[in-house]
């Protein structure tokens, strides 16, 4: 149950960051997405290791 809450929080933060980046028209949008994907991978890996 707690793991599901962590993923929901991660998802909402990712969507908010991508939306903010798109509104500002950042040229580094690809870099932003890569950082968010890496963050999601690390969170998922940490949950699996538990």
Image (cartoon, rainbow, N blue to C red):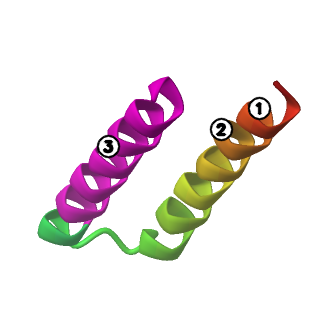
Nearest the camera: 32 or 11? 11
The residue closer to the viewer here, 15 or 46, is: 46
Q: Nearer the viewer, mark 1 or mark 3?
A: 1
Percent of width and height locating residue 41: 70, 52
Q: Main secondary structure of the magenta part?
A: helix
Q: Give the distance between the C-alpha atoms of the residues marked 2 and 3, in whole angstroms.
A: 13 Å
Nearest to N terminus: mark 2 or mark 3 = 3
SS for callout 2: helix
Asked whether the residues under the numbered discs 1 and 2 touch, taking CB atoms below 8 Å apart as contact, a structural biologist would say yes
Considering every residue shown, the one lying at the far left of the view is 23
If the image is split into quadrants, where does the N terminus sit? top left
- The quadrant holding residue 4 is top left
Residue found farthest to the right = 49
Residue under numbered circle 1: 46
Closer to the camera, 36 or 49?
49
The magenta region covers 1-21
**Is label 2 or label 3 in front?**
2
Does 20 appear in magenta? yes
Label 1's element? Answer: helix
Say what secondary structure mark 3 lies in: helix
Circle nearer the N terminus (1, 3):
3
Residue at left offset 73%, top offset 41%: 42
Position of 39 relative to 50 (above/below)? below
Check disc 2 and report the residue beneath it. Answer: 43
- Distance (Cα) linking label 1 and label 2: 5 Å
Q: Is residue 2 left or right of residue 16?
A: right
């Amino acid at each position: 149950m707690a793991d599901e809450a962590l993923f929901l929080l991660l998802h909402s933060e990712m969507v908010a960051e991508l939306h903010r980046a798109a509104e500002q028209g950042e040229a580094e949008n690809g870099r932003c997405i890569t950082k968010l994907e890496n963050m999601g991978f690390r969170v998922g890996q940490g949950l699996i290791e538990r």
